[in-house]
Amino acid sequence: MITGGSRGIGEAIATGLARMGSDVVLVADDAEGLERVGRKLTDLGVNVDQHVVDLRDAGEIQALVDRAGQIDILVNNAAPGQGHLPFLETPETDWQLQFDLILWAPLRLIRPIGKAMAERGSGVVVNISSMSVRDAAPYVAPYAAAKAGLEVITRVAALELGAHGVRVNAVAPSFVPTARVGHLANDPAFLQRAAESVPLGRLATVEDIADAVCWLSSDAASFVSGQVITVDGGLSAGRFRPPVKSGS
């Protein structure tokens, strides 16, 4: 099950898992996007279920869990945009939206699905966090605070569920230019500056994030749990200073 699976990072994760042979349960509030991704995954030879769900609604989440059946891999990816307002000007409704989608929706999925995984003795949960938890920036306080809470849930759930064969991890991407952050993804000057700040010299792609999720979901990561895997091209290694060009 992948939430936010109708586009961007969620679509890439769903595609990666389908290529590994996993049947896929796609969850999003975008029926048209779900249909498009569903057709693509079906062409890969896997079974696909699509569910249009408002993940802010506890009742709709419970109905989703009841309909979906056995889930072996749960990926909590759904999130709104990061926000554009200064900390002191961000209304409470914006905070609530971030916490509803980033924190409460995963909680409402992990509790019943994680319990079923524990009863079976196996399962994987991967939560999508963000580099903004460690690298604070203006205008993203609600988003980053919710992601920080999700990382705590990741670690505690890993501690409590590990004895039952369930692994819980998170992936923390740096900036990924997707439609969800279109105001930045469509700014060539910003993209160039951002890429130049990355030691590997480029921005992350949705496939970069999906590859990390697929690895954590596979037996290749069978002894990895309670971790936040940072996928940032080396940004968090320290302060990167692009080399001074010769003659300047």
Image (spheres, helix red, strand yellow):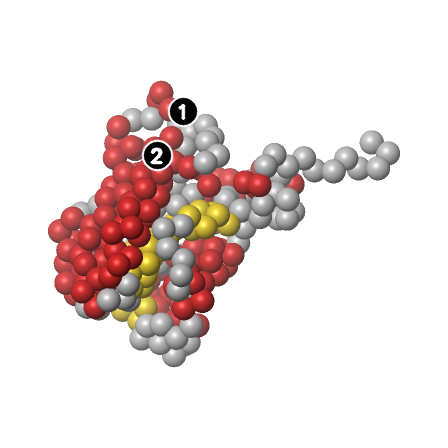
Name the spot of residue 116 as percent of width and height, x first: 19, 63
Q: Which residue is mark 2?
A: 145
Specify the farthest residue to the right.
247
Mark 2 residue type: Ala
Q: Which residue is mark 1?
A: 86
Dividing the picture into quarters, in which one does residue 86 lie? top left
**Does 55 sit left or right of 2 as displayed?**
left
Residue toward you, 221 or 55? 221
Numbered disc 1: secondary structure:
loop
Q: Quadrant of the N terminus?
A: bottom left
- Counting from the top left corner in percent of width and height, residue 6 is at 36, 58
N-term mark: 1 or 2: 1
Could you tell me which quadrant the C terminus lies in?
Answer: top right
* 132 or 14: nearer the viewer: 132
Residue name at image x 35 percent, y 43 percent: 151
Disc 2 crowd, CA 10 A, few/some/many (<14, 14-19, 20+):
some
